[in-house]
Amino acid sequence: MICLAAAPLSAQQAKNLLFYGNSYSQRNGSVADLVQFLAIEAGHPAPTVVKRFTGGSDLQFHATDAADVQAIGSSLPAGQQWHAVVLQGQSLEATDALGDPQQFRGSAVDIVDNVRAHSPNADVVLYQTWARAESHFLYPGTFATPVVMHDQIRANYRLAAQDIDVAHGAGTATVAAVGDGVALLEFADGYYEGDLYHPAPAMTLLAGMSLFTSIYGQRVCELSPDFQSSSPLVTRLQGVVAGAVGAVAQAAASSAATNGASRRAAGAARAAEVGRVASIGCTGTGAASAVPRRRRPDCGAAGPSHVVPPEGLEPSTRGLRIRCSTD
């Protein structure tokens, strides 16, 4: 069942969406396909999705690779334009410690220049990535904590959006703050693959939810999928649940070898949170839907802020919190 108040399908135009990214976008059936499934479930015409994913690539690669540049003009029928382009950078390039933020920001503008030369009104969505999991070896040597790494990535994605707006006009770029949602999950190992940086299926779902809201401007959590159906979204969600079981088991096994019983207990306690991410029938929206209950404020009827990027998801000296919509 769909609970969205949507315009008649005849009044809507299917969106053309161009995705640039790497394995972060490609994992778990691809975040681009998930955005497409969410759009269909919400009653939109199925968007055309073009994926330019290359493992390990950064934004400079996508800005300069001949095939990626050519795809802008060759991937659509004559006369059609892109409605939005999604930019996902390499996982370290937006960090001050291990990346090159200036190159990252400049390459983001270069890609938008390329796209808008073909499609002058294309929107830009910056897919903000996340810090490594809490048990990753980069802590505390390279980054003191996951929050320090997160803050660097978050700040530079926002600066890239500002750069794009300066070059192409206010409101051109939006940050889909997926990394904020991961931060609110406390960078728990169970949401990652065994390498502690690639996304497990539940994290890809979180990313798809945030990107859908950024592109379509609608609350994901107002969807009520019929789990008795075999729609593409339901099939994907069932896969997320199955993948979550494996991810939690893997995290528990890793914990047993490193941090003992306390870590195993924490991993088991978070299994329910993975299921909460997979459930679209939630009270928040986008990244906020994945927040463990103990982190949710009592917002009453207002609910948590639903804007993506979720401006209410802000680091503080006491950890991470959500502002209510009325704050």
Image (tube, rainbow, N blue to C red):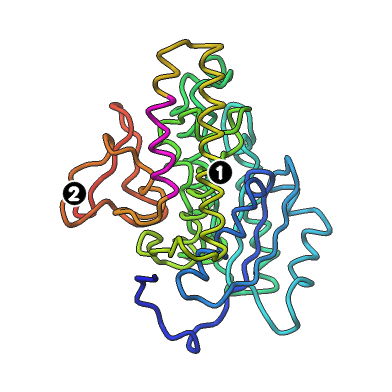
Give the image location of residue 284, x and y in percent.
Answer: 31, 53
Q: Nearer the viewer, residue 263 or 79?
A: 263
Q: Position of residue 309 (x, y in %)?
A: 42, 53
Task: Give the distance between the C-alpha atoms of the residues marked 2 and 1, in whole angstroms.
Answer: 29 Å
Q: Position of residue 106 (x, y in %)?
A: 64, 49
Q: Which residues are magenta?
A: 267-278
| Crowd around label 1: few <14 · some 14–19 · many ≥20 (10 Å) | many
Q: Position of residue 29 (x, y in %)?
A: 64, 52
Amino acid on which the number 1 mark rests in the picture: Pro
Q: Residue at x 37, y 62 (%)?
A: 219
Label 2 environment density (alpha carbons within 10 Å; few <14, some 14–19, many ≥20): some
Outermost residue to the front:
228
Q: Is residue 143 above or below residue 69?
A: above
Image side of residue 305 versus residue 43, left or right: left
Q: Quarter-wise, where is residue 32 in the image?
A: bottom right
**Residue linked to disc 2:** 299
Assign the N terminus to one quadrant of the image: bottom left
| Residue 269 covered by magenta stretch | yes
> Is 208 included in the stretch rendered in magenta?
no
- The chief SS type of the magenta part is helix
Residue at the spot of label 1: 201
Which residue is pictured at 53% across the width and 25% down the height? 251
Amino acid type of the residue that numbered disc 2 sits on in the rendered structure: Cys
**Circle nearer the viewer, 2 or 1:** 1
Secondary structure found at label 2:
loop
